[in-house]
Amino acid sequence: MIRMPLHDGWTVGPKLGPFESAAEGRAPVAVTLPHDALRDLPRSPDEPQGVHTGYTPGGVFEYARSLDVPDDWRSRTVMLEFEGVYRDAVVFVDGAFVAHEAGGYAGFSVVLDPFLRFGAVNRISVEARAHRDSRWYSGAGIYRPVHLVVADPVHIPLDGVRVETPDIDDERAVVAVATEVANTTRHTALTRVSWHITAPDGAVVACGESPVTVLPGERAVARARLVVDAPRRWDVETPELYRLHSTLTSADGAHLDDDVADFGIRSLQLDARHGLRLNGRSIDLRGACVHHDNGMLGAATEPAAEDRRVRLLKQAGFTALRSAHNPMSRAMLAACDRHGMLVMDELTDAWTRSKAPFDATITFAERWHDDIAALVAKDRNHPSVVMYSIGNEILELATPLGATWSRRLAERVRELDPSRFVTNGINGIIANLDRMAEARDQVPDANTMMADMGEQMGLMNASPLVSASIEESAAVLDVVGFNYADSRYRQDARDHPNRVIVGSETFPERIDVMWGLVRELPHVIGDFTWTGWDYLGEAGIGRVDYTDEPGYAPTGTAGAYPYRLAGCGDIDITGFRRPISYYREIVYGLRRDPYIAVHRPQHHGRPTATTPWSWTDTVASWSWDAASGAPVTVDVYADADEVELLLDDESVGVEPVGREKAFLARFETRYRPGRLVAVARRGGAEVGRYALRTAGPVSLVARAEDEVVGRDGLAFVALTLEDDAGIVVCDRDVPVTVEVTGAGVLAGIGSGRTDSEESYAGPVFTTFDGRLLAVVKPTGTGTVAVTASAPGHVPATLEFEVAPSPL
């Protein structure tokens, strides 16, 4: 089988009707896939999709390219494999309809054979559309990789290899392999499948083979149980990956096809007494919800960006990701396998009741069967995947028909993959929107709770009405996912003693409470914060407003234009960890030293408004354009009894930890340039310290994360305003212009600012808290030069090499 990326040579432009002509500025332009057609469109406060998409418009787009089809392909099977097209993808060959895929996240493949002109150049075109069909920024177009597949008529179909490890001990592991063989000819095919397994070090550790007879137009499955001695377990700390090689030959020994699948040897167990056990060891999931976009790259699924996200989330202390609210990309799953990150992969955000005017609910009833099949086929060999989520905050879940759908979907998942667990992100309030007044009456002090949206959601989710209405839908699950319902955790241990719970979506600022419950209650297996990585759309949901700002008007959870980012990630879209990330790390017990977060002196004393997804407007900096003696609030996060704060070795004071909030000590002091040190103590003994220093003279600095980048990778270039010691200043932001020459182009540039009106396409973007990230995409091998310039600064330059093949 020939399977090659088909990413070059495409154009994209607005889809025009037969009686329309391209207006000025709307002609097709050349692009490289994966590509997001929405990212660079002009935003507007009047955009109908509004806050959901970050005020980005929708549209209908046509991608096109020429495909030279050799005459000798006439005897082969030719397919296009799309990992995802958003949305309502329609594929054509020379204007002839080939296929339609309604969903925006399911992978699909199309057979081109009946439509191709062999020995000629064919035109492939793909239509995609997005318009008021999502509650977040979806992007549009061929945003995930696409491959051209040219196979023998007798071949191993896509996702035709399955690997399971049903029987494991320290002596050996049984690896159950199943390889499917497809026969598209008019004759019976006599074939043979052979397998060999290589260990993480490349050594061959098991082999097997089987003859397979495949009737015309049918498929057959070859199976074997191979034994691997002294198996190396895949785990979050030791993500050991084996590789299964499947080879298909004809009866006379001619090679027909082969396939390679990475897998891990690991076991899963689940019960309310021990929680989730991985390889026999109970594990609490330190989880993060993540959306599918890649920040300044838009929705484009670049494997290098997916790998970087997983790597940085793991370094920040997370051990599990929940894909919200759609199936995770293949690239991110592979990254989770490599880095030891567990996965809850989610099917959809809605079933039959819509959440957006033109969302996928209209086709759900006829497509759910195939969508689940696509999800499972993509995931089933990945050791990182431990749970499938069949939905998120489903509107009809609390009805008898909703319970029927719950059971139907859960059983379909189990039919296709009984080796993993099934969950659902249940929000009892969302499922009972039309009965909320009744639920509120069941909660004491409802009027008082109105001042705290988060607390109100939690208590109403534990009301008797919600408990009764979700019982059947919860009963069909292996793990009951609760969104914003930690108030149920202890109650359900009494009412449903066999129920296993996961906090499938929780408020970030409550991690001190949430993690305490996870550690205390064995039937609660983890917590997934909203969110681990900031994202486009649901704009401003995590913002901090200063309510004395002229013209301020409350807008609830919605950020007014020009908000573009949610602003609630532990890590911002550049990969920079926000203060909440360090607080969480301390709560998890992963960080011994304290952490200092300074409230911006220019806003001292101003009244603020937040949402349940907000943190504080703080920065780890002691470099401010503030007068000496200006009042300033300093937070210190610590797992300690008390913290002493020192400025240039003079004590500012000692504060207990936990007065304002668990793991936090707050100081009111005066700003003065120098060295600020927090010393954490427990029982009078020092347990850790952390220091901030005032920056000296500042320069613009460009720093690439890697000296060499693969041809199919990305280069991530950090641009910072820092002194010679690497101390970044956060209140002297400047516009930076980036120029890329040589074997690369600027793919995107952006900052962590949530309300910027600047374009991620660049080449100019303003720093935020002294930081920017530029992303460079190689166009060939050789040297890439990056020059960054800003007013008042000497230009910063760097070079890196692009290797001939991915590293």
Image (cartoon, rainbow, N blue to C red):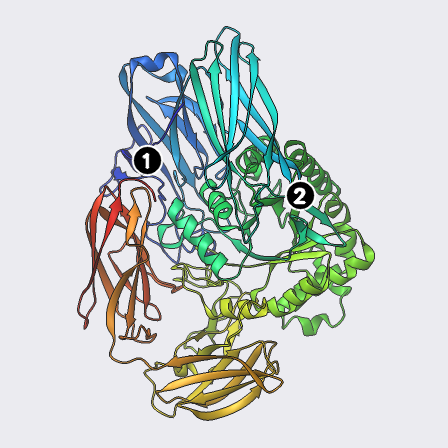
- Identify the amino acid type marked 2: Phe
- Residue that appears at 75% across and 42% down: 400
Q: Position of residue 167 (x, y in %)?
A: 67, 37
**Residue 9, picture quadrant:** top left
- Residue that appears at 55% across and 59% down: 530
- Res 16 visible: no
- Residue that appears at 57% across and 33% down: 163
Q: Quadrant of the C terminus?
A: top left
Q: Position of residue 158 (x, y in %)?
A: 48, 27
Along the viewing direction, whichever of 233 and 690 lies nearer the viewer = 233
Along the viewing direction, whichever of 302 and 170 lies nearer the viewer = 170
For mark 2, give the secondary structure: strand
Pick out the residue farthest to the top.
187
Q: Which residue is mark 2?
A: 421
Q: Is residue 178 left or right of residue 491?
A: left
Q: Is residue 286 left or right of residue 246?
A: right
Q: Is residue 785 left or right of residue 170?
A: left
Along the viewing direction, whichever of 688 and 632 lies nearer the viewer = 688
**Residue 408, picture quadrant:** top right
Mark 1 or mark 2: name the one nearer the start of the chain: 1
Q: How many marks?
A: 2
Q: Position of residue 691 (x, y in %)?
A: 42, 80
Mark 1 crowdedness (10 Å alpha carbons): few <14, some 14-19, many ≥20? some
Q: Position of residue 8 (x, y in %)?
A: 29, 35
Q: Nearer the viewer, mark 1 or mark 2?
A: 2
- Picture disc at residue 7: 1
